[in-house]
Amino acid sequence: MTLKNTANSFFGILGGEPFHASGIIGDPWAGHPDCYFQIFTNGQFITDEIADKLRKLGNCTPLVSHRGNTIISDQREGG
């Protein structure tokens, strides 16, 4: 991932399940300590190793969503 120097220093990482992609944690974000990355996730792929990497990076935070049961999820999402 290559980021160009922009006025925006906040990035939302989403789409499918970001932590399912290999190599998502590490160099791409470590190379931009002046930027903040919010990672939208269901949390199922956050292992102890990934949590340690996130903690060491310091500029990435997972935003974990919890869907709940089908009735509640359908109400929230309009389904």
Image (tube, grey):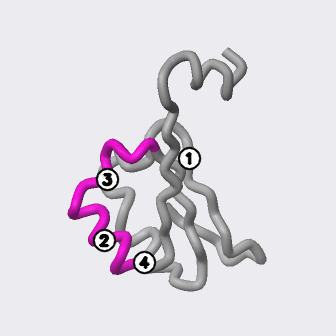
Lower position in the chain sequence, tag 3 or tag 1: 1
Q: Tag 1, which secondary structure?
A: loop
Q: Which residues are magenta?
A: 42-57
Where residue 48 sits in the image (x, y, percent)?
22, 61
Q: CA distance from mark 3 to mark 2?
A: 10 Å
Cβ atoms at labels 3 and 1 below 8 Å apart: no
For disc 1, the marked residue is 14
Residue that sits furthest to the bottom in the current view:
34
Q: Amino acid at mark 3?
A: Ile
- Indicate which disc, 3 or 4, sits on the residue closer to the N terminus: 4
Which residue position holds label 2?
53
Measured in 3D between alpha carbons, the distance from the residue under mark 4 to the one under mark 2, in whole angstroms, is 10 Å
| Residue at x-position 51% and y-position 32% | 67
Q: Residue at x 32, y 57 (%)?
A: 23
Give the Cα distance between marks 1 and 4: 18 Å
Q: Amino acid at mark 2?
A: Lys
Q: Going from the N terminus, do you reach mark 3 or mark 2 first?
A: 3
Marker disc for residue 30: 4
State how far apart marks 3 and 1 are (Cα). Answer: 15 Å
Instruction: Name the main secondary structure of what is drawn in magenta.
Output: helix
Mark toward the viewer: 3 or 2: 3
